[in-house]
Image: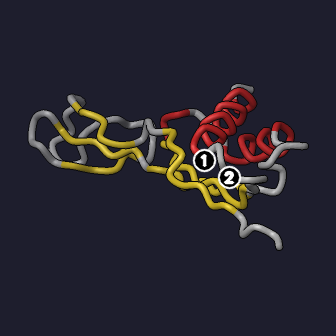
């Protein structure tokens, strides 16, 4: 299950993005963009994140995952389309000469911090 390693890397990325001089930061949400071609199972990633974030500033953080579709452009006719199944061919001319535009990303899009308690 490679999702555990990914969950830990996400925490490292978020940790490095929080200003060092911020006293006791609490992360409320981490917003991710995950491409369909990454072979990441969102439910598994959430589960692993819950386990990995115990006893950390991320313990109560919600992992929000936006799945990014596989979008391609045909190298023959230049048509753009979204691939939803196993057939990687152009929806217009049926060519298999495609360039992937989206679908491989794994990005921390944003981080939401909880309001400091008084």
Label 1 SS: loop
Label 2 SS: loop
Does 57 appear above or below 8? below
Q: How is the image coloured?
A: secondary structure
Residue 26 placement: quadrant: bottom right
Q: Residue furthest bottom?
A: 118
> In the image, what residue occupies the spot 34% across and 35% down?
88
**Viewer-nearest residue: 86 or 7:** 7
Q: Marks 1/2: CA distance? A: 6 Å
Does 64 appear above or below 42? below
Q: How far across and how far down the image is residue 9, in percent? A: 65, 31
Q: How far across and how far down the image is residue 76, in percent? A: 10, 35
Residue on which the image places disc 1: 19
Q: Quadrant of the C terminus?
A: bottom right
Q: How far across and how far down the image is residue 38, in percent? A: 53, 34
> In the image, what residue occupies the spot 27% across and 50% down?
81
Q: Residue furthest right?
A: 55
Residue 15 placement: quadrant: top right
Residue on which the image places disc 2: 22
56 left or right of 97?
Answer: right
> In the image, what residue occupies the spot 21% across and 39% down?
94
Residues tagged 1 and 2 counted as in contact (Cβ below 8 A): yes
Q: Quadrant of the N terminus?
A: top right
Badge 1: residue crowd in 10 Å (few <14, some 14–19, many ≥20): few
**Viewer-nearest residue: 97 or 37:** 37
> In the image, what residue occupies the spot 46% across and 50% down?
68
10 left or right of 85?
Answer: right
Q: Residue furthest left?
A: 77
Q: How far across and how far down the image is residue 85, in percent? A: 45, 43
Badge 2: residue crowd in 10 Å (few <14, some 14–19, many ≥20): few
Q: Which label was assigned to residue 61?
A: none
């Amino acid at each position: 299950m490679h999702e555990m390693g990914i969950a830990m890397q996400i925490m490292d990325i978020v940790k490095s993005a929080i200003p060092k001089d911020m006293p006791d930061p609490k992360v409320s949400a981490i917003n991710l963009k995950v491409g369909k071609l990454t072979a990441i199972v969102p439910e598994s990633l959430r589960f692993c994140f819950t386990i990995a974030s115990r006893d950390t500033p991320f313990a109560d953080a919600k992992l929000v995952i936006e799945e990014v579709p596989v979008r391609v452009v045909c190298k023959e006719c230049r048509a753009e389309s979204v691939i939803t199944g196993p057939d990687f061919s152009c929806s217009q001319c049926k060519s298999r000469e495609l360039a992937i535009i989206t679908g491989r990303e794994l990005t921390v899009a944003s981080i939401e911090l909880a309001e400091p308690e008084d």
